[in-house]
Amino acid sequence: MNSALKYLGRIGKELIALDQTRIRFVRIQLASDIPEGLTLFTPFVLNDWIPADPFDPARPELVEAESISPLPLKRSSRKIKHTLAKMTAPEDLPPLWLAGPSVKYSTMTGDSPSVALLHVGRKLALVSEHRNHELQIGFPWRGGFHSFPFAEEYADLHLPDGVETVAGRRKLKPYFNLNPGSLLIAFSAPEDGYCRKLVVKVLPKL
């Protein structure tokens, strides 16, 4: 992996990045701490990386690296967005190819991706989950309505007191400082035998 990767987000102790040369997503588990100050599309290279060992069927894109070295931004975000637009997930399959908000780890085979970019259109909603008040973002997909919780980047995101739902792209704009139109989602590492689908990054329409 000689070319620079573009930072997209993080989930737990992993980075998720775009390999623009090979048009694929990469998950990186670092031996060192994740550097501060990484922003969307920050380019970086991996230092001393290997494929994940053992292979994780829940995260087939995973590699392990000693550290990363951020680089100056050289390529315009327009070109990066153009690449991402070609990588949107097919709308005739469930988000992340497997049905449900979480998937039993023992059933995962590594044949489907653990990272996907969804084009979700205008009918988005922020929803406070009734049981534990976990904030989720919901959207229509394949004739149904799906909602997934957020990864760590959005830990401070919350709705006003007494508000359980905020619906519509325009109303969501103040929460993300953009008009959301695409979601980068990924499976979490296995926990209690299951991998959850989490929203890693909210992006504009690509």
Image (cartoon, rainbow, N blue to C red):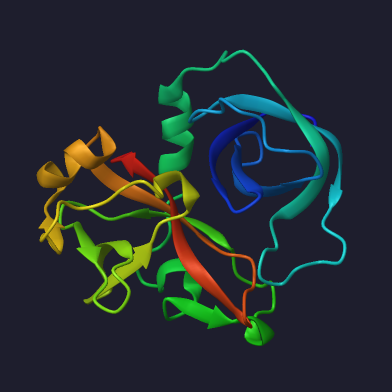
Which of these two is toward me, 74 or 138?
138
Q: Is residue 115 above or below residue 179?
A: below
- Against 185, residue 180 (above or below) is above
Which percent across, then down, holds residue 96? Answer: 48, 67
Q: Please tell me which residue is depicted at 25% across the width and 32% down the height of the picture.
A: 177
What percent of the width, then of the height, locates residue 159? 20, 53
In percent of width and height, residue 206 lies at 33, 39
Name the residue at 63% across, 83% down: 193
Q: Is residue 101 above or below residue 65?
A: below
Q: How many marks?
A: 0
Left or right: residue 129 versus residue 89 is left
Compare residues 174 and 109 and report the one nearer the observer: 174
Quadrant location of residue 53? bottom right
The answer to which image quadrant residue 134 occupies is bottom left
Which quadrant of the rendered structure holds the N terminus?
A: top right
> Can see residue 123?
yes
Q: Is residue 167 left or right of residue 147?
A: left
Image position of 96 with respect to 109: above or below = above
Q: Position of residue 197 (x, y in %)?
A: 47, 67
Decide if residue 3 is in sight here: no
Identify the residue at image location x=75%, y=68%.
Answer: 56
Given residues 203 and 205, the one toward you in this image is 203
- Give 190 or 54, whichever is nearer the viewer: 190
**At 56% across and 25% down in the image, what residue appears?**
37
Q: Residue furthest front?
A: 161
